[in-house]
Amino acid sequence: MERIKISVIIPVYNVAEFLRKCVYSVQKQSVKEIEIVLVDDGSTDGSECICDELASTDERIRVIHKQNGGLSSARNAGTAIAVGEYITYVDSDDWVAPELLQTLLHEVIRTGADIAVCDLLPTSNEDVRFPSSEQRPQQYSGPSAMELMLYQRSFDTSACGKLYRADLIKQFSFPEGRLYEDLFTIYKVMFTAKKIVHIPQLLYAYRKNPNSIMNQSFNVRMFDELDAADEIERFVEINAAQYLSAAKARKFSSYSQVLRWTKDADVRDKAICD
């Protein structure tokens, strides 16, 4: 059996409407030495059956059926059993360009990078075309990439659209029971990497979902984002302050102070009442 180059982790929970399109887009990748790990996180809408159906037609597909534990739990379960040299995550309502894995793999091999990153295409149009790009890939150190990501330049905080060296990403886990799991995790992965290569090309279609957390009415769990920001500040102070200029450090500190103020109990109570 050929050595598996890439493990594609796809968490699945009640996405029967979108699951086949997602998996088909991965099956069509030009890189064939892959495994597709479908983690059924306790689906109840028939998605669990679709997982088994797809696995019966493609020996590269492995299925885990588990009790519902959330996105982080599903990703962690898939990562734990992945055997590829590299790992990538695809959300089950998204889809990817046919050349996604080949492009990312080529760049990590060419540059010796620990992580390759492409750009995400937010869309609700399933017929959208992935535009070509003439821009050249750029290389960064881990701390530099983390800084660009935190300031929302060049890098997205999403776990998706990235190819990770397996022995790197397996050092981390996504926080179970929390929202904004990527915000809690990916900055640490980026910082730990010795080299990251960014391919400025839209290769991952991120489905715009009206039912996503960003489009829901307020609930207390949304304060998880503020907890993540506090963790980021502590991490930067301990591990990365020397990589930031004094001006940038002050800017980041001021941002965190605003977040801490927002978490004040009186403010929180008012937000909940409103």
Image (spheres, helix red, strand yellow):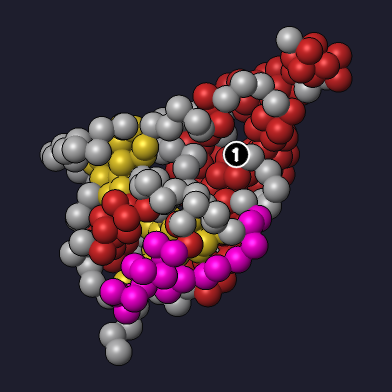
Residue 143: image location, x then y, percent: 52, 45
Report the residue marked by disc 1.
180
Residue 216: image location, x then y, percent: 57, 25
* Left or right of residue 256, residue 143 in this image: left
Q: Is residue 179 magenta?
A: no
* Quarter assignment of residue 163: bottom left
Magenta residues, start to end:
49-69
Residue 167 appears in view: no
Residue drawn where x is 18% and y is 64% of the image? 30
* Left or right of residue 109, residue 98 in this image: left
* Left or right of residue 21, residue 151 in this image: right
In this view, which residue lies farthest toward the bottom? 1
Q: Quadrant of the N terminus?
A: bottom left
Establish if 114 lies above or below 158.
Answer: below
* Quarter assignment of residue 5: bottom left
Q: Quadrant of the C terminus?
A: top right
Considering the numbered disc 1 on the image, is that residue within a helix, a strand or a loop?
Answer: loop
Residue drawn where x is 42% and y is 74% of the image? 62
Residue drawn where x is 49% and y is 52% of the image? 45
* Left or right of residue 152, residue 235 in this image: right
